[in-house]
Amino acid sequence: MLRNRRDAFGWGTIALHWTIALLIVGLIVLGYVMTRPNIDPELQFSLYQWHKSFGMTALALALIRLVWWLASIHPVPVAGMTLLERRGSAMAHGLLLALTVVVPFAGWAVASTSTLGIPTLLFNRVLVPHLPMDRSAAAESFWTEAHALLAYGLAGLVAVHAAAALYHHFRRHDEVLTRMLGIFRRQVTSNAHQQPQGHDK
Ligand code: HEM
Ligand code: HEM
């Protein structure tokens, strides 16, 4: 099942969710490492190019996900969640969706306003045009700050989001995490196989 149903996430949503999650966690670690002082300049240059390439990939997938999300039906919240929890999770998901688009755009703005004018070559192959912005030290420094702040803000939100998912799985024992892993439907099917036997006995 590619598309979401009222009671389950489809493979489209699941594949986009985990691919983007993996990319973003990797980009945060890479971004932190490559901006440390005293790093070898040649290695640093190469890490910056990888960061920009994977960052643009994350942006493309986040835009696809946004369209996919707008065009999809959304599974109902799992049973047992209070109104406050439902509102909190909807807000957190909205913010995650927005930040996955805004953070890479801010990164693109850093590359576009940089006075160094280094081109962004996607995986050393495809030239990504710079955003139509003026190059200046002030603009570069503003976007560098904004990109870092937003990226670490996103990291904090992801940590809370992941902790909430693990809390649901290990403490509440509900299907919040398993349905995002695509296991939910299999459990329902195997239960369905087991139930008639139970009734026979
Ligand atoms: C960068 C990392 C991540 C981002 C940007 C992100 C973003 C999102 C978004 C936007 C949704 C809502 C999906 C929708 O309604 O279509 C969602 C759902 C979900 N995410 Fe993440 N996520 C990330 C990482 C993680 C991690 C690490 C975990 C688990 C350890 C996780 C577990 C879940 C679960 C279980 C749901 C389903 C919640 C529900 O049923 O309401 N996510 N995530
Ligand atoms: C979701 C995608 C992205 C994430 C999570 C991310 C995350 C980060 C992080 C955590 C840093 C380190 C900030 C610091 O400690 O100062 C960083 C730096 C940087 N990022 Fe990204 N980034 C993303 C996308 C992009 C994109 C698409 C570009 C450009 C095309 C980009 C360009 C840069 C640059 C040039 C720096 C270094 C700024 C400086 O010199 O201090 N990033 N990024």
Image (cartoon, rainbow, N blue to C red):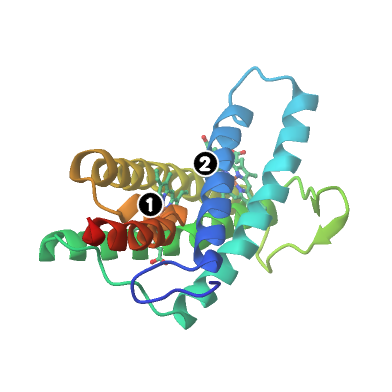
Tell me if residue 113 can be seen: no
Q: Quadrant of residue 130?
A: bottom right
Q: Residue furthest top?
A: 38
Amino acid at dot 1: Thr
Q: Quadrant of residue 6?
A: bottom left
Mark 1 sits near ligand 1, with its Cβ under 8 Å away? no
Q: Earlier in the sequence, mark 2 or mark 1?
A: 2
Residue drawn at the location 81% of the way across and 48% of the way down: 123
Mark 2 sits near ligand 1, with its Cβ under 8 Å away? yes
Q: Give the CA distance from mark 2 to mark 1.
A: 20 Å
Counting from the top left corner in percent of width and height, residue 65 is at: 54, 68
Q: Quadrant of residue 9?
A: bottom left
Does residue 60 appear to the left or right of 187 in the view shown? right
Q: Quadrant location of ligand 2?
A: top right
Does residue 79 appear to the left or right of 153 in the view shown? left
Counting from the top left corner in percent of width and height, residue 96 is at: 40, 58
Counting from the top left corner in percent of width and height, residue 199 is at: 22, 61
Q: Which residue is mark 1?
A: 178
Quarter of the picture containing the C terminus is bottom left
Amino acid at dot 2: Val
Q: Viewer-nearest of labels 2 and 1?
A: 1
Q: Residue furthest bottom?
A: 71
SS of the residue under disc 2: helix
Q: Which mark is residue 25?
A: 2
Residue drawn at the location 66% of the way across and 62% of the way down: 134
Counting from the top left corner in percent of width and height, residue 148 is at: 49, 43
Q: Residues within 10 Å of mark 1 (few under 14, many from 20)?
A: some
SS of the residue under disc 1: helix
